[in-house]
Image (cartoon, rainbow, N blue to C red):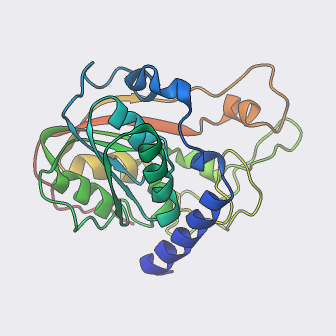
Amino acid sequence: MKPSDAHSHNRAAWDRLAKKQNRLAKPARDGDFNDPLATVDGSGWLSPDISGKRVLCLAAGGGRQGPIYAKAGALVTVVDISSSMLELDRLVAAERGLNLRTVEASMDDLKSLQDDEFDIVIHPVSTCYVPDVRPVYGEVARVLRPNGIYISQHKQPTSLQTSLKPDGQVYRIEFPYYSDQPLPICSEPNRIREDGTIEYIHRWEQLVGAMCRAGFVIEDISEPMHAKRDADPGTFAHRSQFVPAYVRVKARRVGQAKVSNLIV
């Protein structure tokens, strides 16, 4: 499948999910704005005051990330491939009197944004929707100023490999690790995969190694905790006891991108 085919498919899929009010297309709630930075930066990876900072919320439409960072005083640009997801950001901003810019684009092609334009790039879970993460990291490195902060979250490869439902108490590896082919499209709504989207498994050498080769130094990594010991089998919380769903990475741009010899 060509990257452009995956992009077109996922653009339509996210337009549809936004209109269905998917869980990732639910705007921020009133309480999220009481202490906005605490809402989005529970790890304390950002400085306590981001007023006036130029923040790019990448592949982050849906009416949550952008408005919350804008409420914290940042100068926010939201980029998303889905016009319907961006419309949610514009609606929330208008309702709450917030200023933010929206740009419809794919995360791996940010030609409408300038070099060294941003102090911070916030990138929620979305790299799974592109076949190759290297162009994404290259674009982030280009638009982020030297010494700027890049915070991203990704689906862990083992989670995408693993069955959604258990066989008794056991979850099974269903898909190969070394593959550049998209996963079968999932039609069942769940907490692991977004129904109707095309997703790819990216290996750790791609998620982390390619980030380093793009000119970033990784400063911290966390694995958001979703496991619950007494959760019922088959639930997201039960599965998370065995397979962590996400990884969150704090990186800093310190140099120019290196020529990659990553085998894909």
> Is residue 227 placed above or below 69 in the rendered structure?
above
Foreground residue, 73 or 180?
73
Total marks shown come to 0
Can residue 202 be seen in the rendering of this structure?
Answer: no
Foreground residue, 242 or 9?
9
- x then y, percent, for residue 222: 44, 28
- x then y, percent, for residue 229: 75, 19
Residue pictured at 50% horizontal, 74% vertical: 6
Residue 106 in which image quadrant: bottom left
Foreground residue, 67 or 171?
67
Q: Answer with left or right where residue 175 lies relative to residue 219.
A: right
Foreground residue, 145 or 232?
145
Can residue 177 be seen in the rendering of this structure?
Answer: yes
Residue pictured at 43% horizontal, 76% vertical: 3
Q: Answer with left or right where residue 228 lies relative to residue 134.
A: right
Residue pictured at 46% horizontal, 27% vertical: 33
Q: Answer with left or right where residue 72 lies relative to residue 180.
A: left
- x then y, percent, for residue 214: 21, 53
Residue pictured at 27% horizontal, 18% vertical: 48
Residue 19 in which image quadrant: bottom right
- x then y, percent, for residue 122: 34, 42
> Is residue 112 placed above or below 37 in the rendered structure?
below
Q: Quadrant of the C terminus?
A: bottom left
> Is residue 254 placed above or below 84 in the rendered structure?
above
